[in-house]
Image: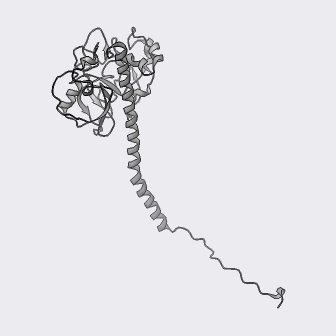
Amino acid sequence: MNASTAVSAPPSRRHPYQHGFTLVELLVVIAIIGVLIGLLLPAVQSAREAARRCSCTNNLAQLGLALHNHEFAFERFPAGVNEESGPIKSLAEGHHVGWIVRLLPFFEQQRLARHFSIEDGVYADTNAAVRSVVIGPLLCPSSPTPSVRESGGHRVAVSNYAGCSNAVEAPIDDDNNGVLFLNSRIRFSDIADGSSNTLVIAERRGSEGDLGWTSGTRSTLRTTSPILRRTDETWINDATPEDPLFVGGFGSHHVGGLNVGLGDGAVRFLSENVDAEVLRQLGDRADGELPAESEPW
């Protein structure tokens, strides 16, 4: 038999349909993906919050360093607020130059300091432009509240950090026992309880009546009265008090507590469940009492 008469092998037969996923297999894959996402999402959210909390800690550390540099330069901490007389009302009236304004040259904000007229007071039209400037280190990344608000026909930028004026709820005045209050001139030597045992700055929540980071009112000063808890969903912001002399306590949007800055420059995370007596002692610069708890953190 020659090659021309050779019989070629028949072509291989193929199935007319390609193999694919069945509906059951597809549903199983979707269910597995859903379970994996459900397991990973809380971990991702937790990692993001940890990063935001770390950034918040860094903001407080910058402010603490600026406070130290001010004390080294002028041999005293800045006044919590400057005004001829007290108590201070949380209204857009008066001079009200706050402690953050005095710190501007000490955390790389010299340009804002040059454009702000201390003599004219916070609410003067000449200072409206500076009041509207948002400063990154004054904002906590975990805070959902707006960084700019309307106040008296002007846009004002806010601060998520405040100084401690008094250990218990009391109007901002010249007899407060914190470190930053009305016309205060506190030195390290005046912190008799030790700078590492005294709370100077901490986180605060925003409020509808916020007067901005330039104002030395409850917008930048608070007391170590009970901490506002994050778990209370009605307290996304501070409640706006009817009494303009009310100051209020610290608070944050972190889970379980808030970051605080101590007199020695250290930043600690303070539990929202801290004992009220411990909190009061942290706010008083010179109570002279034995600590109610050696490690409140």
Q: Quadrant of the C terminus?
A: top left
Quarter occupied by residue 59? top left
Looking at the picture, how far across and down is residue 206, in whole percent? 34, 28
Where's residue 32, x and y in %?
43, 60
Left or right placement of residue 204 versus residue 157 in this view: left
The relative height of residue 140 versus residue 42 in the rendered view (above or below) is: above
Mark yes or no: residue 153 visible: no
Image spot of residue 77 (x, y percent):
32, 17
Please tell me which residue is depicted at 79% across the width and 87% down the height of the picture.
Answer: 6
Q: What residue occupies the far bottom of the structure in this picture?
A: 1
| Image-quadrant location for residue 260 | top left
Question: Viewer-proximal residue, 47 or 248?
Answer: 47
Q: Residue at x 37, y 33 (%)?
A: 57
Picture coordinates of residue 22, whole percent (x, y): 51, 69
Q: Does residue 24 appear to the left or right of 63 in the view shown? A: right
Please tell me whether residue 151 is drawn above or below residue 253 in the rendered image: above
Q: Would you place residue 79 above or below residue 29 in this image?
A: above
Question: Is residue 192 visible in the rendered structure shown here?
Answer: yes
